[in-house]
Amino acid sequence: MVEIGADWPARKPSRPRAAPPSHSGVTRRSLLATAALLITTSGVSARVVTKVLPWKPNDAYPVTPVVPGGYLFFTANEASVVDAFVDRLIPTDELGPGAKDAGVTTFIDRQLTGPYGGHDWLYMQGPFSQNPLPTQGLQSPLTPREQYRLGLAALETYCTANFNRSFVQLSADEQDKLMSGMEKGEIQLPNFSSKMLFNAIYANTMEGFFADPIYGGNRDMAGWKLVGFPGVRYDFRDVLDKPNQPYTLPPVSLQGRPAWGGH
Amino acid sequence: MVRRLQRKDVVIVGLGWTGSILAYELSHTGLDVVALERGPWRDTAADFNIGTAPDELRYAVRHDIFLRPKQDTLTMRNNPSQTALPIRKWGSFLPGNGVGGAGVHWNGQTWRFLPDDFRIRSHMIERYGEGILPEGNQIQDWPVSYDDLEPYYDKFERVAGISGKAGNIKGEIHPGGNPFEGAREHDYPTPPMKQGYQQELFTRAAANMGLHPFPRPSANLSVAYTNPYGCSMAPCTFCGFCEWFGCANYSKASPQTCILPALIREPSFEARTECEVTKVNLTVDGKMATGVTYVDAQGEEWEQPADLVLVCAYSLFNVRLLLLSGIGKPFDPASGEGVVGRNYAYQTGSGSLGFFENVKFNPFAAAGSTGVALDDYNSDNFDHGPHGFVGGASITCAHTNGRPIRYHPTPSGTPMWGSAWKKAVRDTYQRVASVGAQGSVMSYRNNYLDLDPTYKDALGRPLMRMTFDYQPNEQKMANWMADRCDEIAKAMGAKATQINRLRVPWNVVPYQTTHNTGGAVMGNDPKTSVLNRYLQSWDVPNVFVMGASAFPQNAGYNPTGTVGALTYWGLDAILNYLKSPGPLVQS
C-alpha cells in the first residue's frame, strides 16, 4: 500500500509535534503556534483564547495545488484502466472535454494519496457488520485506496478471463456494457464487489470533473463551462438584479483564470 | 491522573451559538466563565478566507469543518428490533465542530415557531378530538408559549440581524409578510433579501392560488448591519457558498460575526479549544454538579470545577453528555419510563422539482436563505380534519447554490453517465426550480436516543445510539405536502415536474437536514421531561441545557430561531438562579 503523507489540506507550518496526540481527530491545530496561543499556568495543553481575537495578516489554510504529471498512487496499468473508465463515464464529445481529458485520473490519484484515500477522518473502528441495513450507509472496512487497488486488479482479472484482453483494450461498447453490469452489481468480479468499484470511480469522477481545478481535475474548468457555473466569483448581486438573463462572464477558480495569469 | 484546575463561576460545554451567547452575557456581568470546545478555534479571516472558502470539494464533499466521525459519531437503526451500526461517514445530517459550531455552516433560515406549535397536543385535541393523534405518539405541549418567547425571539433576531418582512406586528397584518406568524413586537431588523427569477414565478403563482408567499427570514443579511453587541456585518453577495461553508464575507450571522468580537473583550472570559468534556461531575448524592472533566489535546485529563454547568454542545451531544454523566433517568421505550433520550425528532423533506423551458434561473447566484416561502400548510393553519395527520410544513421555492459536484440535476429517466447524461446535465442546469416542503416530526415512543452497547468513540466512551424512522403520520403529511408543492410548481409554468415523496425508511446516506431535536426536552412534568420550563435540569439544578434537544417535538421550520430565543429565555432564568440558587420550579 502506498502511503504518501500528503498534508491535505495544507496547514501553515506548525511547531514540530512533541508527541503524537492520543486521539488525533481532536487535534487539528493543537500545536499551531500563533500569537494568541497560550498554555495555561496549570499546563493544560489547549489553545486558550482570551481578551483578544487571534488574528494575523494573511493567516489562512489553503490547499496545496495539484501539479499534474505522473501518478503518486496508481501504477501505470491502473491509471490506464481508470483513464478508460472515466472516459466512458464522461466522454469527450461535441459538447467538450470529458473526464479523462479534464484530468480526472490525476484528480483521483491525488485524492487517494490524501486523507480521503485512507478514510482518515471517518469512523473506521470495528466490528464491521456483514449484513448492514441498506439505510446504514458505509459499513465496509475497505478504504478508497484499497477499493481501487483490489477492485482494479479484480476488474483486470475478470477482463482477461472473459475477453482475453485488458479493460483498456475492450471496444467502447464492450466497456459500456461491462460498466452497466457493474453499476447494477450484476458482474461478478473475483473477490470484489463490482458495484463498489463502480460507485467509487463514479463518485470520484463527478468530483474530479466538477471540483475546483486546484485539485487536478476540471482542467480548463471544462466541467464548469459545460453547465455554466461561474466558479468562485463570490458576488452575484448583479445577477439577481437582471433576472432570467444569461450569465456571460467566464468562470474563475481558486487560482484565478488563465487571462489573469492563473490556471 | 486527573488534575484539578482552579474553580470558575461558570463552565460552558461547547462554543457555538448557545454557548457564545451565554458566555458573553454572563461574563459581561463579571462572572468568571470558561468555555470548553472540543473542536478547533475558527475565525473568518483564517478559516473562511475568501481565497479558500468557496471550495465545494473540501467543505461540502470531504466535510473539512464538520465533526469528524473518527472523533465522535453515533450509531443508528430504524427501530428497536434492529442492530445499530455506526454512522461511519456523515450523510443525513452534519454536526458542526469547533468554535461557532453548526452556526458556522448553517444556511441561516431563522424562523419563529407558530403559537399553535407550542401547545400542539392541546390544540389538536381541542379542535379535532383525541383521535387525531397518531399511534405511539408522545406529543406534548411546550412548557412555554409563543408569547413567553416573543421578546427573546426579538432579541435573537436583533443580535443576528435577520433580514425579513414582518407579517404581523402587534396583531396588525402586513401584506407581503407571513400573515400566519405570531404577533411580533417589531419588524425584522433588516429588510428582506433580493430574490431570484424562480422566486418571482413562485410568488406570482402562489398568490394567484390564494396562498400567502413571503420572503423567508434570513441570517444572510440584505444590508450592512451593526448588532446590539456592536458587531458589524456586511451585505450578502449571493456567492452560493453558504450552507456547509463558513462565510468569508461577514454576511452570515454566526457566533463569529455576531458574538465573538464582543465576547472576547470580556476580561473574565476564556475559551479553551480542542478540549473534550467527558462528563459533568456530580456530588456524591448526585444532586449538584461540581464541574466537568475534560481531555485536552494531548490526551491529558483535567477537572474543571465550577458552580454552574451550561451544556451547549449541540442537541445530540447534549443528550449524550447527560447520559454519560448520569444526569436524569435514561428513557426506556419498553417500559416508557425515563426521560433522557426521549422524544428525539427530526424533519421531513418532500416536494417537487419543476423543469422549465427557455429560462435562466442562474442557480449559482444564491444564498443559504434566499427563497420565498408560504405557511398556508404549516402547523394548524389549514383544516386537518379531512387529512388525518398531525403537523405541517413550510413550503419554499429556493435555491441555495448551483455548486456542480452535488447540483447537476437531470430529468428522471436520464442515464447516469455517458454522452446522453452529459447533454442532459448541460441542458438542465439552468432550468430547474424546486418547491420544497420542510415538515414537522412528532415524537414517538420508538424514536429515541440511548448509549450504544458495542461501539466506542476515540476516547473509549460509548457512542450514542439513534433509533429513528418516519412514522405513518409523517409519511402521510409529507406526501400530501409534496402534492401541494407539485401544484405550485405546475402553476409556476413547469413543463414537467418530478414529485419527491418522503424517503422511507429513514436513510443515513443522502443529506437531509441537520435539524436533530429532542432527547432532553423541556416540560412541566419531570416524568416526561429532562428540563423544567427554564431549561434547568430537574435533577441537578446547577445544570442548564441549551439547544434543540429541549424541543418536545419538531415543527415545520428550521430550529435555530427557536434555539436562539430559548437561549435568551434560559439566560434570564440563569440570572434569576444566580440570585437565589436552587430549583426554579419545584418538582
Image: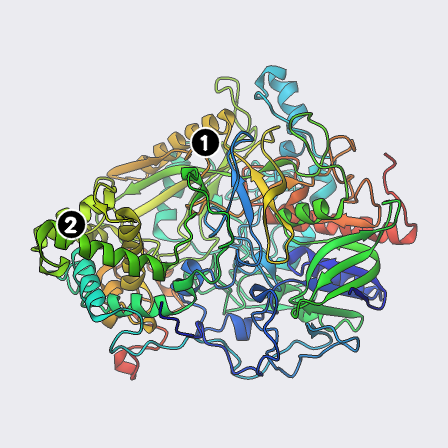
- Splitting the image into 4 quarters, where does residue A200 fall? bottom left
Q: Position of residue A133 (x, y in %)?
A: 43, 37
The mark tally for this picture is: 2
Is residue B574 in sight in this rendering?
Answer: yes
The residue tagged 1 is B478
- The correct choice, above or below, for B355 with respect to B479 in the image is below
A4 or B445: nearer the viewer? A4
Q: Is residue B357 left or right of residue B390?
A: left
Give how far apart the Cα atoms at labels 2 and 1 are: 33 Å
Mark 1, chain letter?
Answer: B
Looking at the rendered structure, which numbered label has been put on residue A56?
none
Q: Amino acid at mark 2?
A: Ala
Quadrant of the frame with the C terminus of chain B: top right
Q: Are marks 2 and 1 on the same chain?
A: yes
Q: Amino acid at mark 1?
A: Ala
Residue at 75%, 76% (x, y): give it: A43
- The correct choice, above or below, for A177 with respect to A22 in the image is above
Looking at the rendered structure, which numbered label has been put on residue B420?
2
Q: Position of residue B345 (x, y in %)?
A: 58, 37
- Splitting the image into 4 quarters, where does residue B342 fall? top right
Front tag of 2 and 1? 2
Mark 2, chain letter?
Answer: B
Marked residue nearer the N-terminal end (2 or 1): 2
Q: Regarding mark 1 in the picture, which secondary structure is present there? A: helix
